[in-house]
Image (cartoon, rainbow, N blue to C red):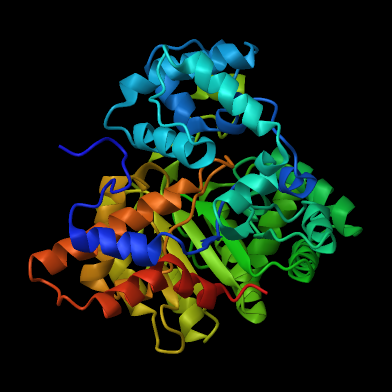
């Protein structure tokens, strides 16, 4: 029987161990999509407690605590940090077979050299030990990033955001390379007309322009697109239920925008047309600049209206959706490809039932101009666990070229989440090793190691070409 979380965790053969320890383990991390706060990175803060570093903003843990019967006051409420940590420690033993059990102990090991299991009996020791370490310079935010050998971080930023933290970090000569990602979801969220008008007002302020009509709106947004590019941005991102690709006319869009500005009701058909023109326009701008565009598809958000009104969005009440994806996605990509204006594209799905469809779809638009131009993105959110990662890797292997895959990301709001890259690398190495052991792949360690190193690091480094 193997020991829990030893150095050969998830590695079930000598070949898997060789591939991971000798080839994948030490590679730098390119985290090309996350939700880390840029001000904390630029400010190089030290967290006062492990609760602040580990539990604040982590809706994965919040969902587990709620499922364990923990009162909200210990999750997002006003209880003391130590009390919140104690309730998390009381929950962890009940997370057996949930990836949180692996991640929790992997993070305690990698950041704090703590091999004890987290439970009520060890909570006080672990809390005090982590808090003491977090006060030292090597445990500052940038120290935590360096500790995990992170080479690049891409934050997620709204077009109206001030990118001064990114600029300041570059001027400071920090070894941490932090780039913004242009995420204009709020700019096309026409479901809330009053909210969209408030957003337009904010856009007017940051772009120092007046927005009267739809052309003004696009002009202001494109100025922000230029601003992001001037601050090192080469990546966009969209979080959508599904891609929008409805037919529309310029006159229809002008009239829809006039309704928005007058705060008049907008029909469902008009909402889809507005989102379609916005998504297409953003894609054109990304192609013009040679950016990579990302589409995170399939989240059913804010499902609990009572707790949404109490706690707000991004607090753990989103779910996997079962939206129809193939036809609108194909129509959208085809329109861009037909005009030779399809940028490098990464498509993530949240419903594992769509894995094979997504893996097949990318092959329709890989045209030989760039290796892996259109990517089936890594297992995301509810799927970034052992089973979900394995299914995504197998679907991509069966339908396309896993060897051209750009690998893992954290998609996280926590600075302690980077061991997820290690988790992915272990699963990847073991997957290849199983095929070699079974005689399904040749026992060519040199070539297999090259493919694994490419997936873990070099493919992403080439694909994004961060400066």
In the figure, residue 194 lies in which quadrant? top right
Q: Residue furthest right?
A: 208
Q: Observer-nearest residue: 268 or 122? A: 122
Q: Is residue 327 visible?
A: no
Which residue is at 49% across, 50% downward?
A: 410
Name the spot of residue 209 as percent of width and height, x first: 90, 59
Name the spot of residue 444 as percent of width and height, x first: 21, 78
Viewed as shown, does residue 457 lie left or right of 10? Answer: right
Q: Observer-nearest residue: 25 or 163? A: 25
Viewed as shown, does residue 389 lie left or right of 218? Answer: left
Which residue is at 40% across, 11% downward?
A: 69
Which residue is at 71% across, 55% downward?
A: 257
Q: Is residue 207 above or below residue 319?
A: below
Q: Residue furthest bottom?
A: 369
Q: Observer-nearest residue: 67 or 335? A: 67
Name the spot of residue 137 as percent of width and height, x first: 72, 41
Q: Is residue 102 visible?
A: yes
């Amino acid at each position: 029987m193997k020991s829990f979380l030893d150095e050969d965790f998830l590695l079930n053969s000598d070949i898997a161990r060789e591939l991971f320890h000798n080839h994948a383990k030490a590679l730098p991390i390119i985290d090309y999509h996350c939700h880390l706060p840029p001000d904390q990175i630029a400010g190089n803060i030290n967290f006062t407690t492990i609760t602040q570093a580990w539990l604040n903003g982590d809706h994965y843990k919040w969902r587990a605590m709620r499922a364990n019967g923990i009162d909200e006051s210990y999750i997002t409420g006003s209880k003391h940090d130590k009390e919140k940590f104690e309730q998390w420690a009381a929950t962890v033993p009940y997370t057996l077979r949930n990836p949180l059990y692996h991640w929790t102990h992997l993070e305690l090991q990698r950041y704090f050299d703590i091999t004890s299991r987290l439970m009520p009996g060890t909570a006080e020791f672990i809390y005090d030990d982590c808090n003491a370490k977090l006060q030292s310079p090597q445990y500052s935010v940038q120290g935590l990033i360096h500790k995990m050998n992170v080479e690049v971080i891409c934050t997620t930023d709204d077009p109206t955001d001030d990118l001064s933290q990114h600029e300041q970090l570059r001027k400071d000569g920090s070894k941490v390379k932090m780039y913004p990602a242009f995420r204009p979801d709020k700019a096309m969220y026409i479901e809330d007309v009053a909210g969209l008008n408030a957003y337009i007002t904010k856009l007017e302020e940051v772009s120092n322009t007046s927005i009267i009509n739809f052309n003004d709106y696009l002009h202001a947004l494109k100025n922000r697109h230029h601003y992001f590019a001037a601050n090192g941005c080469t990546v966009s991102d969209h979080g959508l239920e599904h891609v929008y690709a409805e037919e529309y006319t310029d006159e229809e869009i002008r009239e829809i925008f006039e309704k928005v500005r007058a705060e008049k009701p907008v029909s469902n058909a008009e909402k889809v047309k507005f989102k379609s023109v916005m998504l297409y326009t953003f894609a054109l701008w990304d192609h013009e600049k040679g950016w990579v565009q990302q589409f995170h598809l399939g989240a059913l958000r804010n499902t609990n209206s009572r707790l949404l009104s109490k706690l707000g969005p991004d607090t753990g009440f989103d779910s996997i959706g079962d939206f129809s994806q193939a036809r609108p996605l194909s129509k959208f990509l085809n329109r861009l490809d037909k005009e030779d204006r399809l940028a490098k594209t990464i498509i993530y799905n949240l419903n594992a039932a769509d894995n094979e469809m997504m893996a097949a779809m990318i092959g329709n638009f890989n045209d030989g101009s760039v290796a892996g131009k259109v990517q089936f993105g890594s297992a995301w959110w509810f799927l970034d666990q052992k089973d979900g990662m394995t299914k995504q890797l197998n679907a991509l292997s069966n339908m396309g070229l896993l060897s051209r895959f750009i690998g893992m990301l954290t998609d996280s709001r926590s600075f302690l989440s980077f061991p997820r890259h290690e988790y992915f690398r272990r699963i990847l190495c073991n997957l290849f090793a199983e095929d070699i052991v079974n005689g399904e792949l040749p026992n060519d360690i040199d070539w297999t190691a090259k493919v694994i190193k490419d997936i873990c690091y070099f493919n992403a480094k080439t694909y994004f070409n961060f400066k």
